[in-house]
Amino acid sequence: MKLAGKTALITGAGKGLGLEIARGLAENGAHVVLHGRKPAELDEAKHTLEQAGAGVSVLVADLADEASTAVACRRLVDDRGSIDFLVNNAGARDRRPLDQLDRAAFRGLLEVNLIAPFDLVRQLAPHMPDGGRIVNITSIAGRIARAGDPGYIATKGGLDALTKALAAELGHRAITVNAVAPGFFATEANAALVADPAIAERLSHRTSLGRWGVPKELVGAVVFLCSPEASFITGVTLPVDGGYLAHF
């Protein structure tokens, strides 16, 4: 229970990787604040974690909306007083090639994937104690690219860069800022891809471990980066990808 007495905000935590991260932080003693846009989904997630003995609260906000984000941050600070850990997990995906992705769609990805994490840090860092932790969930797509997905790739690459910039900005307060870059994980959002035997075959020889990742396999990296043991690690992006980036 190395995180006992700490408060963690996890964005996009109603399901998938965000909910697993929240579960892992709660199992290590943190009070977790589940953020999302769908109250019913958050309430179900809250109930699930509470059944396991976790301290949980919810925060409803649309991170693409500046006013909604500001209100949510004020409400969170009023409720909890301070935030020890911020995990920027919420993200948007719009898989369209360059000739089909217009400025409005690209701007929408920027708002959720890059501007929202910046804005949350800007608003919540003043309420973090010295030694706080910020973990951004990026993607291996921030380092490598494929055709047909320029918006997502650009925003995740930007989040990697923002991670380093914020580490430099907040280091004087011993606040660490790191990122975790997932590879191919079998989440609800990827259900159709997981069911595709062609992708399973590709992963079998494209990654060192030869398979999809299970959501709970991402959790350890986030818990570690929030822990006292990671106090001298900042400004790095840790791939959790089964060896995808290392393997060719």
Image (tube, rainbow, N blue to C red):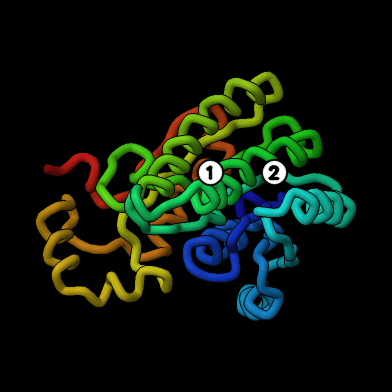
Question: 10 Å neighbourhood of mark 1: few (<14), some, or many (≥20)?
Answer: many
Between the residue at mark 2 and the residue at mark 1, the CA separation in whole angstroms equals 11 Å
Q: Quadrant of residue 211?
A: bottom left
Quadrant of the snapshot with the N terminus: bottom right
Which residue occupies the foreground of this view, 52 or 14? 14
| Left or right: where 223 falls relative to 83 | left
Q: Residue furthest right?
A: 78
- Rendered view: 1 above or below 85: below
| Left or right: where 215 falls relative to 174 | left
Find disc 1 in the rendering and name its residue. 136
Q: Is residue 54 visible?
A: yes
Q: Residue at x 25, y 47 (%)?
A: 146
Q: Quadrant of residue 203?
A: bottom left
Find disc 2 in the rendering and name its residue. 120
Q: Residue at x 64, y 38 (%)?
A: 118
Q: Residue at x 14, y 69 (%)?
A: 198
- Rendered view: 84 above or below 58: above
Where residue 55 appears, x then y in whole percent?
72, 66
Quadrant of the snapshot with the C terminus: top left
Q: Amino acid at mark 2?
A: Leu
Mark 2 or 1: the one toward you? 2
- Rendered view: 168 above or below 95: above
Secondary structure type for disc 2: helix
Where residue 242 appears, x then y in whole percent?
26, 52
Secondary structure type for disc 1: strand
Q: Residue at x 68, y 80 (%)?
A: 40
